[in-house]
Amino acid sequence: MVALVQTVAFLGLEARGVEVQCQVAPGLPAFNVVGLPDKAVAESRERVRAAIAAMGLSLPPKRITVNLSPADLPKAGSHYDLPIALALLGAMGIVDAETLASYIVVGELSLDGRLAVTPGVLLAALHASAENLGLICPALQGSEAAWAGDVEVLAPANLLALLNHFKGQSILTPPDTGPAPEPDYGPDLKDVKGQETAKRALEIAAAGGHNLLMNGPPGSGKSLLASCLPGILPPLSPSEALEVSMVASVAGTLEGGQMSRQRPFRAPHHSASMAALVGGGLKVRPGEVSMAHLGVLFLDELPEFQRAVLDSLRQPLETGEVSVARANAHVTFPARVQMIAAMNPCRCGHLGDAALACSRAPRCAADYQAKVSGPLLDRIDLHIEVEALSAADLTMPPPAEGSGAVAERVAAARSTQRQRYAGLEARTNSEIDGDELEKHATPDEPGRALLTQAAQAIRLSARGYTRVLRVSRTIADLAGVEKIGRIHVAEALSYRRQAPRN
């Protein structure tokens, strides 16, 4: 007898259908899994054997063959445990094969039959919904699967509970989506003393989704300013929250199955490898730039990252996605992020202070900043110098305006952009290009004249010219005006610098 169970294989954010076929036939006792399984799938034989034994059952002394079809599609992950176990139980006649045919099954088995958390349940649930099938998944991820909408979800705590449900002895309760986690907005802008120019640049970056580089000595507040950014960003829309949660689900970081409306904020250490930052590895997983999709990627101590690692961000920052190519797979992850970076002016960090600067200044600054390539710097919209704080600045009373007031202006500007780009791929000013850039970001005649003059004076690249227009559009949106004027272009140019030649 051959029993069939449906499951999925994950390729990036795509769930592909996989049919688990199990045959119990006469012959010498054996248990084989075929169909390009990886090590984790091959080891599922022992987990399945132990989980079935924990229920008081034993495998038949026959030849058991499990085929994962299509056979030429690589299978990776521990979520094949439960479908293999159910297919085997179906072939043994313990579970009705027709009942199993109406579900997609994912889940890792413990040796005592408990179902453990496994990545990708949300993607499996969306695939099940598209195929008009139900989903069987671990109990701890039932709320995650419930976000898929109109799909029947069975979320048992262990294999025995699932069998009792099928036999009608105890009915599993349908899971619900559960409460959303409380947002963590981090520090308030009231905690930042001085640095009015930096706060203004941070507001512009938040309003338009622009990349920002802060350059200043140690202790000037660069990291504090970056950590204030989540408090002024607008919440994710329901569709955006689903996109972000899909990436987190594949990465296995969607804790408790809770979908948050807060934008991601990722801050990898400068020792991160290229695979950790942009994705990859033996089993291709999303990197930090994809985990920050529709949110913020904060790179502190920018020149301390390996140059090759930083340059790997150039394509994602331009296209909004990461393509990881391997000999046996080609996987694409979304990576629409705004990058916030911070760096010291030189290795010692005190280039502007003659009393503290090292003996190699200013040569040390040129060598240190040359670690960041010109093409990467050209992709950063806003460049600001963060000055060191004096004792007088530190003794000043806290500023009257905090993150709440700034967040209101940012939300109003984002609302304007959402209405302007309704029906288009672009969500913010940082994403517009081509005809939309020409239509919505063309300044008036004085502004155009200033931009042309400045582009020749500081030798703006075509990319730099485009990014000045985008920032000008955001500044005008914050001001509540439709037409970009000379004053908006002038402020955008003040945040621009020519990328150094390396």
Image: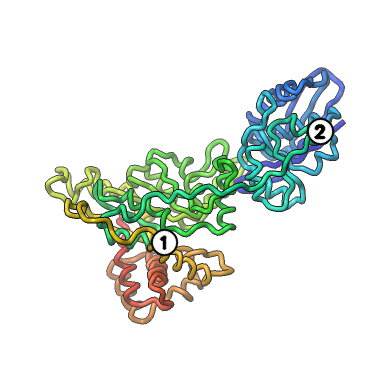
Type of amino acid under label 1: Ala
Asked whether 466 or 145 is in front, the reply is 145
Which amino acid lies under the numbered mark 2 shown in the image of this protein? Gln
Q: Residue at x 56, y 47 (%)?
A: 247
Seen from the viewer's position, the closer of residues 437 and 4 is 4
Measuring from the top left, give residue 105's x and y in whole percent.
72, 39
Mark 1 secondary-structure assignment = helix
The secondary structure type at the circle numbered 2 is: loop
Q: Mark 1 points at which residue?
A: 407
Q: Which colour scheme is used?
A: rainbow
Instruction: Please tell me whether residue 281 is drawn above or below residue 290 in the rendered image.
Output: above
Please identify the quadrant where the N terminus is shown: top right
Query: Residue 233: percent from the left, percent from the top?
Result: 44, 58
| Residue situated furthest left in the rendering | 355
The reply to whether residue 118 is visible in this rendering is yes
Residue 169 shows which numbered tag?
2
Residue found 70% across the figure and 49% down from its top: 127
